[in-house]
Amino acid sequence: MSAVSSVTAPAAAATGASDSIAWVRVSSCYLPLANPISDAKVLTGRQKPMTEIAMLFAEVETRDGHRGLGFSYSKRAGGPGQFAHAQEIAPALLGEDPSDIAKIWTKLCWAGASVGRSGMGVQAIGAFDVALYDLKARRAGLSLSKFLGSQRDSVRCYNTSGGFLHTPIDQLVVNAQASVARGIGGIKLKVGQPDCAADIARLTAVRQQLGDAVPIMVDANQQWDRPTAQRMCRIFEQFNLVWIEEPLDAYDFEGHAALAAQFDTPIATGEMLTSTTEHFELIRHRAADYLMPDGPRVGGITPFLKIAAQAEHAGLMLGPHFAMELHVHLGAIYPTEPWVEHFDWLEPLFNERLEIRDGRMQVPTRPGLGLSLSDQARAWTRGSAEFGQRP
């Protein structure tokens, strides 16, 4: 079902502005996954297998005809809530100068302040924030990474989608080999099963097949308690891993800090945090060697840049979570070489594809994000709402 609203932009907001936002559309799109996805949260009974991803798209157009596209997302739950909140706050964009991105972020945050400054509320803001940066970079004729100040034209990438726990061990090895053959630089395996021996067997099989030269990461998805995490981190030291991800609950900063201080293998976490404040606390506790902020989850590019600046100051490495279509640009601007997560799940939503070669993801040179919504994305859209009037 599609809803269309006509809201007139406040004249006062546009006074003196060189351009102003005239039209906004938000869309709720559900991306079906080919197979139900299981990680440790499923095997420990805390979640059900994931069958779809709820995408929130924001399209913005100005009085002078400049356009931007942004997105956020939710897994398993929260999609309808994000879409509903986006509809509530979207009228606040109308009449604003699209260049005033920080001002608009603050305005949208206060428009929905009663739901807080983290979680679903800021995730809805994230779609608009990304759209405004996309618009601004497009208007400048630059890719988003060049617009923000790029450090490199490509980033290291690793594949996660082939390493989930629903995948049998023989297929796991095949998937890992295929990713390396495709030109992806590293392989991440899901761990955190109730039977720790099964985790060790899966990792051993992949390491033996790929050899010592291929970078491997593991991800426990918060399912270990402190004694188990300590035991598994000690066992995993022999595998020369790039990192051990989310060995503990995402908010156990002290526990993660203790692991990071004790073991040679780096600790990675941060993907489940949904605000700058939460990330600052994680950094303050020295709870990660690799920080893993998720642009859409923290509220878009505006807060992501604040988090990245704090991480740089603390000397942390960066591994943004999911959404490679955005994070390839944000990873390219980080001073030290990051790892960007490769998921091919979102590819059907866009007409463009990222290029992978020699272990690296090439940063698109097209203006803005370099993305346009596909006909398939429109077909999977379950609801949309428009505000203002297109020029």
Image: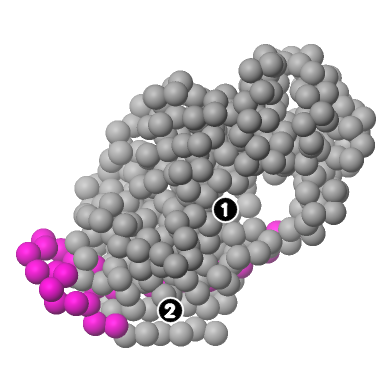
Residue 127 to residue 242: above or below: below
- Circle 2: is it few (<14), some (14-19), or many (20+) Cα within 10 Å? many
Residue under label 2:
385
Query: Is residue 161 or residue 50 the one in the foreground?
Result: 50
Residue 283 % position (x, y): 50, 31
In the picture, measured across the screen, residue 269 lies left or right of residue 365, that is right
Give SS at disc 2: strand
In the picture, measured across the screen, residue 76 lies left or right of residue 323, that is right
Which comes before the other along the chain, label 1 or label 2? Answer: 1
Residue 300 % position (x, y): 42, 51
Query: Is residue 122 or residue 101 the one in the foreground?
Result: 122
**Residue 73 appearing in the image:** yes
The range drawn in magenta is 7-35
Residue under label 1:
347
Q: Quadrant of residue 48?
A: bottom right
Residue 205 % position (x, y): 86, 26
Tag 1: amino acid: Glu
Identified at 43% across, 75% down, the residue is 87
The answer to whether residue 23 is magenta is yes
Q: Quadrant of residue 215?
A: top right
